[in-house]
Image (tube, grey):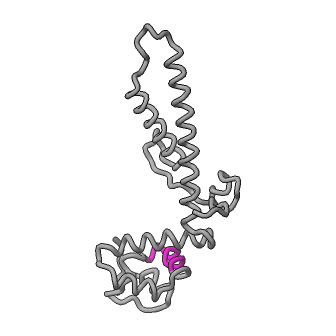
């Protein structure tokens, strides 16, 4: 975890707020100077005073998760001021529903293929294996659409900026529906 000290540049929060970064700065461990946009977004949405109060009320081991959550929500609110994270959640729920329908269709095709073969011979795959194959196909399709590269082994985070390209309703995945 990066931190600020008197000898280094001030943390992103103190630099943004144009104040001296003291050794006990509550923001320093969570807003390193290399990530000024992180604090800028959090400050814009929640305010420095509110974030400071929140961090002081939490136990030290809970603070990093809280800051990451605040930063994620702040970035989502900057992109979509009305829905924020809800648009991402709605988009992903719709994607899961669509993938479930695709999986059901693939399983139905697989069952038709398996039952269409000569019944006197042993089935190509049993029901247990069909379930495993369906589950594997479902997981592969979901992770591929979420940005996981199976061949290169790397992870490429899903880009919310492409929501409008994949969602015909336009509104960043929100679509105006209640969640």
Residue at x-position 32% and y-position 73%: 62
Residue at x-position 62% and y-position 73%: 81
x, y percentage for residue 125? 41, 21
x, y percentage for residue 159? 57, 57
x, y percentage for residue 90? 57, 58
Is residue 106 shown above or below 22?
Answer: above
Residue 7 can be seen, yes or no: no
**Residue 148 magenta:** no
Residue extending farthest to the bottom is 19
**Is 106 left, or right, of 30 in this rendering?**
right
Report the front residue among 51 and 138. Answer: 138
**Is 50 left, or right, of 92 in this rendering?**
left
Residue at x-position 48% and y-position 36%: 137
Looking at the rendering, the stretch of residues picked out in magenta corresponds to: 33-42
Report the front residue among 155 and 91. Answer: 91
Report the front residue among 88 and 51. Answer: 88
x, y percentage for residue 75? 54, 70
- Quarter occupied by the C terminus: bottom right
Is residue 16 shown above or below 94?
Answer: below
Residue at x-position 61% and y-position 64%: 178
Residue 58 can be seen, yes or no: yes
**How many labels sit on residues?**
0
- Quarter occupied by the N terminus: bottom left
Q: Main secondary structure of the magenta part?
A: helix
Report the front residue among 40 and 36. Answer: 40
Identify the image quadrant of residue 106: top right
């Amino acid at each position: 975890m990066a931190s600020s000290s008197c000898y280094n540049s001030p943390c992103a929060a103190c630099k943004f707020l144009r104040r001296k970064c003291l050794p006990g700065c509550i923001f320093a461990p969570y807003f390193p100077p290399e990530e000024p946009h992180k604090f800028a977004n959090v400050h814009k949405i929640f305010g420095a005073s509110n974030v400071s109060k929140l961090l002081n009320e939490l136990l030290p081991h809970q603070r990093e998760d809280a800051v990451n959550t605040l930063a994620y929500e702040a970035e989502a609110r900057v992109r979509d001021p009305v829905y924020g994270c809800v648009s991402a959640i709605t988009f992903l729920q719709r994607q899961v529903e669509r993938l479930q329908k695709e999986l059901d269709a693939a399983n139905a095709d697989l069952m038709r293929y398996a039952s269409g073969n000569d019944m006197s011979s042993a089935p190509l795959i049993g029901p247990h294996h069909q379930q495993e194959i369906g589950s594997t196909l479902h997981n592969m399709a979901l992770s591929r659409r979420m940005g996981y590269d199976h061949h290169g082994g790397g992870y490429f985070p899903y880009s919310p900026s492409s929501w409008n390209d994949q969602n015909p309703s336009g509104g960043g995945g929100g679509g105006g529906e209640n969640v």
